[in-house]
Image (cartoon, grey):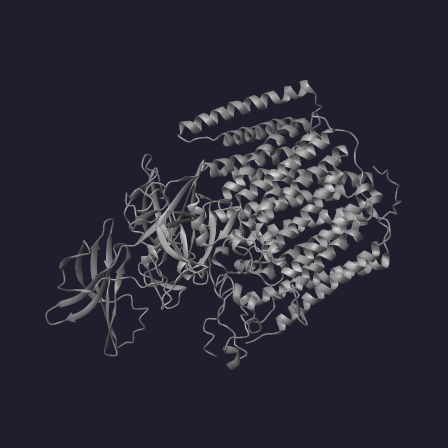
């Protein structure tokens, strides 16, 4: 066998290693139901959950808990996933400042006991890039 | 006043640019078709040139129109309205261009035009085929901003769309179709940074530069000139490697300085999208070098040069089609161009790969087998490692694409990017770094000498010994300072040190021969230093803001929780790592005054951008504003002054991490402030502040009836009521001559200093008004409630609030300067290589004057088919 062939085979081997390892590392989007099932099975790998924040009649978010003067690294909230299952989530970081304005929230983490411990929060703000109204546009000039 | 002329002129220019690019592509194609390289149809060539020049003029005109719209604050246009505002300085108006997708396409088109014009003069006999590719690319790019609707088909998105056409549902158009908003919504605050003025143009110039070698490679394949394209392609690839590399690192520095994720690289898909082509570009550069030196790796060069450009197109598709969706924080919004982008990408992939496959057998290969003593072998292995590294990032970054594709064919996929991206990428990229550092050292040493066992051992002994010594020393030092060192880190440290030392020894040897030869060595030293900098600053970044208050909210999980942020009460010092840290208040940027100005010295007016000075604003002896002066402020940013004092050395420094209240972006955007020392950075940013958009929660007003000279206790502070006088700060009240304003004068003794408080009592048109005065430092507000002139008694209302605080995160980043200085060295190395090759071309120009003076008919030579 020529050296070139060994070389090519080594490259292919590394490429396959990369692919399988990436497949192993890749996370999934799940519902809270599935996240709980995974935790019950002892599977502690981190998952992504997409959800919305429950709001009351005045559009205020319900169940936000952040008291920086007590502990600046504890933020808890309730998230309702796409199957309308609500789940208490804890995030050991300060509350993201634009949190209450976001429509959709993506969290990464895993269930621990009855609580979903999130280590990353990604917010989708409705007006992040495309504005929908113009200030002062009602006053016709 | 609605001005449609400038927009129509711009839109017309886009259409002209598009048509001219099509004509140029066709004419250049016809000029070169069926003929050998250098032999062109003169008539078609003339049309092609003319069309490209028309295209260039049209593109310039598009840019001029768009800049005119932004600069003239013509908010009837959506682009100006959504990307700029009245208060934006001119240099940031340039940034408005690339905030939007259309503008950044325009920037890319512009660079292609510039490069095209250079090639028009410089490419000589390559002109027709190379410009065919160029004009073809321009045809696609201009179609992206065409903004033409044919039936149901929308081609491109025009930057010249009017607001009323963009948002036709607004009720205002019914009452006033000529409505023009008074102000734009402004440039994204995070982009208002000098790096953002130069980083995107640099990056897009890098993008554009990859087109040139690609065009040469395609031209070479098309005209069956499989070797001559290498020399010109080589220089352009060097330029591309330099500019793209520097552009990527500028973006990293911007992220470090402006964003608050705590570093310079986040493995965001948008960052990866440019990192991948750069790796492949550098690999292709090595392929070209191998061909020039030892007539090998030509096929590899073809593949890699073409792959680089295709990966740039893929990056464009990733960041602009909206396919990333949730996966990226900062990709562009979807403009509905995905279809067009896929066609663009597919066209170039299919055409270039078909061409490559069709000509594959004809590309010369060398028969000689490389041995371990050939540096070529190690360079080739290095290039392969770069490609594998690129492949790894590409494979993971494309996960959202797999989802989209599977969704398109009807399979529901819920695959997500790895939850811990940093760990995932580091796992591979660290070993790529190891291989690159080691091979760059080894191959560089072998490159410049004749190799056999004896000579190789001879040259490698000194660097290898020094490396082992140095690595041992560093490992001991690291352990001495109480850090652990994982085996992987030890390997990276050792190989990177070897990369530095072997290259340094080579550069010294070369300097004796000829300095200009050492460009490669210098660039490799830079890369190895960058690896060391990354290892130190990312592997050993140390969060010093550990919460030590002892208060724990988290009842559920006691041990493993993150305590990375501390709460700092205003003016209360707190220990943090080796420092005592104190937050002392909020500051503003006042143009013309060095440093920042205490918010308590400023009286805000109805105009956000204006304030009154409450006291003299001085720096040293120089007086900038007197009390009562109106001054301009930049209200977007609030700077939080944080004092650091080292407990041991008593050394002091002050950081001003900033935060912007930004309604459109939703909330508060924090940017860090960084104190740079030679061997580490202290990086700190605000994580949270008390809610800004809500009114403060004041306690109920407590009334005090006082006579002049009385002393009272307010919110635990001693205060003396010193008297009543005519009010000074009446400029904001708009008083007439019959009106009366008096103010109380209090002196409050705070922890650190004394505060003068002046609540004002106004009688205007027989109506009583009160202007309270607030001491933010103390959480105290006084208002002047009533006057009893008979008894000489005055009533004041006192209310208190929670003291101001910030939540801060501070990180120590050791030896991050190695990364930046490594980047500079790498750039210098690229520059030296370019300089050397500039001389080469001149030399060839002297020896073959005919070749450059006028096109010479070239007889196609039958080539040996390998």
Residue B471 appears at what percent x and percent y? 51, 26
Residue B453 appears at what percent x and percent y? 68, 19
Please tell me how many numbered marks the rendered image carries.
0
Image quadrant where one finds the C terminus of chain B: top right
Instruction: Tell me if I can see residue B262 in this picture.
Output: yes
From the viewer's side, name the closer residue of B744 and A61.
Answer: A61
At x 83%, y 54%, the residue is B32
Q: Is residue B517 left or right of residue B75?
A: right
Q: Is residue B548 left or right of residue B39?
A: left
Q: Is residue A66 above or below residue B69?
A: above
Task: State which quadrant residue B846 falls in.
Answer: top right
Task: State which quadrant residue B147 falls in.
Answer: bottom right
Q: Residue furthest top?
A: B454
Q: Is residue B305 above or below residue B325?
A: above
Q: Is residue A120 left or right of residue B168?
A: left
Instruction: Tell me if I can see residue A98 in this picture.
Output: no
From the viewer's side, name the closer residue of B9 and B144.
Answer: B144
Residue B492 appears at what percent x and percent y? 53, 32
From the viewer's side, name the closer residue of B777 and A111.
Answer: A111
From the viewer's side, name the closer residue of B646 and A6.
Answer: A6
Q: Is residue A89 left or right of residue B64?
A: left
């Amino acid at each position: 066998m020529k050296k070139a062939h060994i070389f090519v085979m080594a490259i292919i081997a590394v490429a396959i290693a990369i692919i399988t390892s990436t497949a192993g590392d890749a996370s999934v989007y799940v519902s809270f139901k599935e996240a709980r099932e995974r935790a019950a099975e002892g599977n502690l790998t981190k998952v992504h959950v997409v959800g919305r924040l429950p709001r009351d009649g005045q559009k205020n978010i319900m169940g936000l808990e952040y008291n920086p003067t007590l502990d600046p690294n504890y933020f808890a909230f309730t998230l309702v996933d796409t199957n309308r299952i609500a789940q208490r989530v804890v995030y050991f970081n300060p509350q993201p400042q634009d949190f209450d304005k976001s429509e959709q929230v993506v969290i990464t983490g895993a269930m621990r006991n009855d609580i979903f411990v999130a280590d990353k929060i990604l917010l989708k703000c409705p007006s992040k890039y495309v504005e929908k109204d113009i200030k002062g546009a009602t006053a016709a000039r | 006043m609605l001005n449609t002329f400038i927009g129509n002129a711009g839109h017309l220019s886009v259409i002209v640019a598009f048509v001219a690019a099509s004509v140029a592509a066709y004419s250049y194609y016809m000029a070169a078709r069926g003929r050998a390289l250098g032999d062109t149809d003169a008539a078609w060539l003339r049309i092609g040139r003319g069309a490209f020049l028309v295209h260039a003029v049209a593109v310039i005109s598009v840019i001029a129109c768009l800049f005119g719209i932004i600069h003239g604050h013509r908010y009837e246009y959506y682009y100006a309205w959504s990307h700029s505002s009245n208060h934006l300085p001119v240099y940031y108006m340039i940034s408005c261009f690339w905030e939007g997708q259309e503008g950044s396409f325009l920037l890319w088109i512009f660079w292609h035009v510039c490069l095209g014009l250079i090639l028009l003069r410089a490419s000589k006999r390559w002109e027709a085929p190379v410009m065919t590719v160029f004009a073809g690319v321009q045809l696609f790019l201009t179609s992206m901003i065409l903004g033409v609707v044919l039936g149901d088909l929308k081609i491109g998105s025009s930057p010249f769309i009017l607001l009323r056409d963009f948002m036709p549902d607004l009720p205002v158009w019914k009452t006033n179709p000529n409505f023009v908003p008074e102000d734009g919504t402004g440039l994204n605050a995070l982009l208002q940074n000098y790096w953002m003025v130069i980083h995107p143009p640099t990056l897009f110039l890098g993008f554009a530069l990859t087109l040139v070698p690609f065009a040469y490679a395609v031209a070479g394949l098309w005209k069956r000139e499989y070797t001559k394209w290498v020399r010109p392609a080589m220089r352009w690839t060097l330029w591309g490697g330099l500019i793209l590399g520097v552009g990527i690192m500028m973006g990293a520095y911007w992220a470090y300085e402006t964003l608050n994720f705590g570093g310079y690289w986040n493995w965001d898909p948008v960052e990866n999208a440019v990192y991948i082509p750069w790796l492949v570009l550098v690999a292709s550069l090595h392929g070209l070098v191998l061909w020039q030196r030892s007539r090998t790796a030509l096929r590899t060069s073809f593949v890699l040069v073409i792959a680089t450009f295709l990966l740039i197109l893929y990056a464009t598709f990733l960041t602009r089609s909206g396919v990333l969706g949730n996966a990226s924080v900062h990709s562009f919004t979807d403009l509905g161009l995905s279809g067009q982008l896929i066609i663009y990408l597919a066209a170039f992939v299919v055409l270039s790969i078909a061409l490559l496959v069709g000509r594959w057998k004809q590309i010369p290969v060398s028969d000689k087998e490389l041995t371990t003593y050939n540096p070529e072998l190690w360079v080739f292995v290095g290039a392969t490692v770069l490609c594998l590294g690129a492949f790894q990032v590409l494979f993971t970054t494309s996960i959202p694409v797999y989802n989209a594709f599977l969704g398109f064919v009807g399979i529901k996929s819920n695959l997500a990017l790895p939850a811990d991206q940093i760990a995932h990428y580091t796992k591979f990229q660290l070993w790529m770094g190891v291989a690159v550092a080691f091979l760059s050292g080894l191959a560089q040493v072998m490159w410049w000498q004749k190799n056999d066992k004896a000579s190789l051992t001879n040259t490698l002994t000194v660097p290898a010994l020094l490396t082992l010594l140095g690595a041992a020393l560093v490992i001991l030092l690291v352990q001495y300072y109480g850090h652990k060192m994982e085996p992987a880190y030890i390997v990276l440290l050792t190989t990177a040190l070897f990369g530095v030392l072997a290259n340094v020894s080579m550069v010294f040897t070369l300097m004796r021969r000829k300095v200009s030869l050492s460009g490669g060595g210098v660039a490799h030293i830079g890369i190895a230093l960058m690896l060391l900098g990354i290892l130190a600053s990312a592997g050993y970044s140390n969060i010093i803001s550990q919460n030590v208050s002892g208060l724990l909210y988290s009842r559920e999980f006691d041990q493993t929780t993150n305590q990375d942020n501390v709460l700092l009460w205003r003016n209360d010092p707190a220990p943090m790592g080796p420092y005592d840290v104190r937050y002392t208040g909020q500051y503003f940027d006042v143009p013309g005054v060095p440093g920042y100005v205490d918010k308590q010295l400023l009286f805000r007016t109805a105009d956000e951008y204006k304030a009154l000075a409450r006291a003299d604003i001085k720096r040293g002896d120089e007086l900038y504003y007197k009390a009562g002066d109106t001054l301009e402020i930049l209200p977007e940013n609030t700077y939080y002054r944080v004092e650091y004092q080292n407990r041991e050395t008593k050394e002091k420094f002050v950081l001003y991490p900033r935060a912007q209240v930004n309604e459109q972006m939703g909330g508060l955007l924090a940017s860090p402030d960084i104190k740079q020392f030679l061997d580490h950075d202290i990086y700190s940013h605000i994580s949270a502040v008390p809610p800004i958009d809500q009114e403060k929660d004041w306690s109920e007003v407590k009334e005090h009836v006082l006579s002049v000279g009385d002393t009272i206790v307010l919110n635990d502070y001693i205060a003396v009521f010193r008297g009543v006088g005519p009010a000074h700060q009446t400029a904001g009240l708009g008083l007439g001559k019959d009106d009366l304003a008096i103010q109380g004068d209090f002196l409050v003794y705070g922890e650190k200093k004394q505060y003068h408080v002046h609540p004002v009592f106004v009688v205007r048109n027989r109506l009583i008004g009160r202007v309270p005065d607030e001491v933010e430092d103390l959480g105290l507000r006084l208002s002047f409630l009533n006057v009893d002139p008979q008894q000489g008694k005055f009533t004041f209302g006192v209310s208190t609030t929670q003291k101001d605080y910030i939540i801060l995160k501070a990180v120590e980043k050791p030896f991050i300067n190695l990364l930046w200085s490594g980047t500079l060295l790498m750039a210098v190395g690229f520059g030296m290589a370019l300089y050397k090759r500039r001389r080469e071309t001149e030399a060839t120009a002297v020896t073959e004057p005919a070749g450059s003076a006028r096109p010479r008919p070239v007889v196609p030579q039958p080539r040996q088919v390998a």
